[in-house]
Image (cartoon, rainbow, N blue to C red):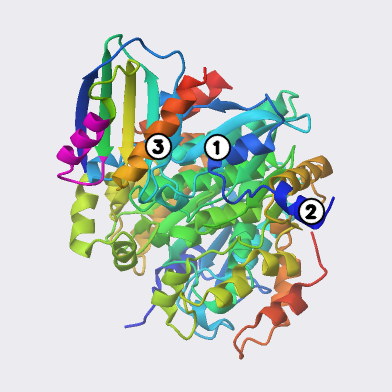
């Protein structure tokens, strides 16, 4: 099990918050809350060791060159594939976008 | 060496002072009404019956007959003392290796039989009977939930053979995909996972832990010690709430109290 | 409504997670979660064992109305650690039931509905899970004096271990076909008693003994519903409206002992035997 932290430049905090997913085998739970303006912070607790690079790549593809909302994201991951991670994140973004 | 423990039986015999067990219960269930000092007490023990009608319940496990039998034994005490000023104490002598594992058991609803026992013990406690659990051997998972865990006060004897747990080591290791050694190592730093009675005591669930000299067959001083402790426990219950709130408060159960506080605040 | 239209209108309850199930049962706009995930009241024991925790510890506590009746719902998330109960999840359920009983003593008629998707004690928290389950049992018996406690076992995890005893303490139980209700998990029985006694890989065999349909046919549960949110909701509402039963199933020791005394235990048990032995006698 590893705890990893990531940070990206961001815009304004979103108004809402969202919870998607669940810590089941091959799945993950994502909590998205408003963070500090200008910063997107992500904390990942994952059952998979040695996965820092994979997470870094995934987030970089999602956020590099973008100005995402200033969210504080907590991920509790139980071995989800990058595809499932992306799906859950996008579900979460959609939910906070609906406020 | 028998495949089953005799401790529960021996402590039942010692505490009942040779008064025989009551009729009308399965052979695996020993029930006796005795006086301990000034108090009326019903003793209850689940013991091995090698001739149990249910072949998977012949080593002292709590199975169908034992679950429903306990319920009946406790219900009788509740009914008999319904209008009594001082309701008799119920003393669960606990030496149960597990619930019974078997096809008949599942098919006939052993979960319901154990619920019957837990129901009666809880109702007895709510009705004002002091319910005391005396752990002289194993107190494992469903068996303990049915017989002993609804007590107002839990007393354990200090001995490697006295253990409370949700599952035996070998099975627990298999289910959690670890080796027994790994499990034991974990248990050393995770008190709720440990098997020894002192770790269990650190969870704040026991009212008292007692050392005796001859746990397999109590000598006179052992008996006097335990009877004295039982009497104190019964007296302690008299003016106390009839719920299980006395089990809260240990450092290792801090979250259990925090959750309740937050629920109350957000209710 | 045509058959296909009816089919299209069916919404699976089994496919919903715990939070969605609780929301689906409560009257629109009345769902209010206590100790919600954002409060992060999590297990103090999992991280040190390298197990990733869940923000609600796998239990959702929600208050609201069900057809106008004030209820608290405790929903166990079967996808997290097999729905097993640890210290925090167990305390959430026990605490909610305790507060519901307290409400009733103050004249507030709060009922409880338990959505049971659980393997029992979380072994990573062993004795704290077991202790919490004992407190859940105590709280059910206490609350049952005032209001019915309704248990729902829908699947796909089912209800096992110490929480199957909790199910047995409920005033009423509702199950689906997919549900199983039994004390011991099939693999544990096979390990303890051998393959001949219990084949844990034989799904039809397991459901024939512990599945929802059989439990209903043997009177060990009260209602048998299709896997549909509307139907389940209706049935739960009906059960709540029945009030406290005259006798609880768990209070019928004499009846069950008499039945068991009639059983020929020399032969292995068959589902039909249980139906004959228990049939037609409901609490």
Q: Residue at x 27, y 10 (%)?
A: A38
Q: Chain of mark 1?
A: C
**Which residue corresponds to mark 2?**
C247
Alpha-carbon distance for marks 3 and 2?
47 Å
From the image, give the main secondary structure of the stretch colored magenta.
helix
Q: Which mark is residue B49?
A: none
Q: Is residue B68 magenta?
A: no
Residue C97 in picture, x, y percent from top left: 60, 36
Query: Can marks 2 and 1 be said to lie on one chain?
Result: yes
Foreground residue among B178 and C251: B178
**Which residue corresponds to mark 1?**
C19
Q: Which mark is residue A88?
A: 3
Q: Residue at x 14, y 44 (%)?
A: A50
Residue B150 in picture, x, y percent from top left: 54, 49
Residue B125 falls in image quadrant: top right
Q: Is residue C270 above or below residue C109?
A: below
């Amino acid at each position: 099990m590893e705890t990893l932290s990531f940070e990206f430049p961001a815009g304004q905090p979103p108004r809402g918050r969202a919870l998607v997913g669940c810590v089941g085998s091959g799945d993950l739970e994502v909590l998205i809350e408003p963070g500090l303006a200008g910063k997107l912070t992500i904390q990942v607790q994952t059952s998979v060791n040695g996965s820092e690079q994979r997470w870094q790549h995934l987030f970089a593809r999602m956020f590099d060159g973008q100005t995402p909302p200033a969210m504080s994201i907590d991920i509790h991951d139980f071995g989800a594939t990058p595809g499932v991670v992306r799906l859950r994140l996008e579900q979460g973004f959609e939910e906070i976008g609906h406020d | 060496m028998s495949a089953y423990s005799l401790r529960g039986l021996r402590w039942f015999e010692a505490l009942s002072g040779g008064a025989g067990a009551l009729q009308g219960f399965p052979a695996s269930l020993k029930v006796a009404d005795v006086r301990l000092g000034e108090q009326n007490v019903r003793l209850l023990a689940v013991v091995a019956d090698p001739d149990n009608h249910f072949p998977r319940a012949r080593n002292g496990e709590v199975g169908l007959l034992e679950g429903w039998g306990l319920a009946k034994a406790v219900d009788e005490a509740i009914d008999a003392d319904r209008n009594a000023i001082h309701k008799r104490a119920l003393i669960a002598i606990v030496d149960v290796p597990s619930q019974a594992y078997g096809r008949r058991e599942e098919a006939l609803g052993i979960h319901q039989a154990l619920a019957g026992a837990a129901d009666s013990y809880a109702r007895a406690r709510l009705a004002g009977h002091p319910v005391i659990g005396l752990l002289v051997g194993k107190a494992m998972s469903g068996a303990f939930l049915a017989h002993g865990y609804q007590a107002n006060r839990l007393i354990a004897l200090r001995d490697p053979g006295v253990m409370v747990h949700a599952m035996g080591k070998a099975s627990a290791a298999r289910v959690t995909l670890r080796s027994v050694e790994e499990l034991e190592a974990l248990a050393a730093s995770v008190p709720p996972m440990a098997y020894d009675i002192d770790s269990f005591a650190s969870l704040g669930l026991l009212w008292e832990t007692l050392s005796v000299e001859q746990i397999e067959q109590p000598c006179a001083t052992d008996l006097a010690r335990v009877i004295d402790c039982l009497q104190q426990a019964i007296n302690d219950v008299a003016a106390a709430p009839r719920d299980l709130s006395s089990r809260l408060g240990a450092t290792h159960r801090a979250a259990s109290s925090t959750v309740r506080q937050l629920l109350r605040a957000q209710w | 409504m045509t058959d296909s239209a009816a089919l299209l209108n069916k919404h699976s309850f089994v496919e919903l997670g715990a939070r969605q199930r609780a929301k689906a049962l409560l009257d629109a706009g009345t769902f209010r979660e206590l100790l919600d995930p954002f409060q992060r009241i999590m297990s103090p024991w999992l991280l040190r064992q390298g197990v990733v925790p869940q923000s609600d510890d796998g239990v959702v506590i929600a208050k609201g109305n069900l057809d106008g009746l004030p209820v608290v719902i405790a929903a166990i998330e079967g996808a997290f650690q097999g729905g097993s109960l640890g210290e925090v999840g167990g305390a959430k359920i026990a605490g909610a039931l305790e507060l519901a009983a307290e409400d009733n003593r103050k004249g507030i008629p709060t009922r409880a509905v338990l959505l049971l998707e659980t393997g029992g004690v979380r072994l990573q928290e062993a004795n704290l899970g077991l202790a919490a389950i004992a407190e859940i049992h105590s709280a059910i018996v206490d609350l049952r004096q005032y209001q019915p406690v309704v248990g729902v076992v829908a699947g796909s995890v089912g209800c096992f271990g110490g929480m199957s005893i909790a199910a047995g303490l409920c005033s009423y139980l509702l199950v689906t076909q997919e549900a199983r209700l039994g004390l011991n998990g099939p693999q544990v029985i096979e390990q303890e008693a051998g393959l001949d006694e219990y084949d844990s890989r034989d799904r039809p065999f397991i459901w024939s003994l512990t599945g929802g349909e059989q439990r209903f046919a043997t009177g060990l549960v009260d209602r048998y519903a299709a896997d549909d949110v509307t139907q389940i909701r209706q049935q739960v509402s009906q059960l709540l409206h029945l009030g406290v039963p005259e006798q609880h199933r768990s209070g019928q020791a004499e009846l069950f002992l008499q039945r068991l005394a009639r059983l020929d235990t020399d032969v292995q048990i068959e589902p039909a035997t249980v139906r004959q032995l228990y049939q037609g006698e409901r609490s």
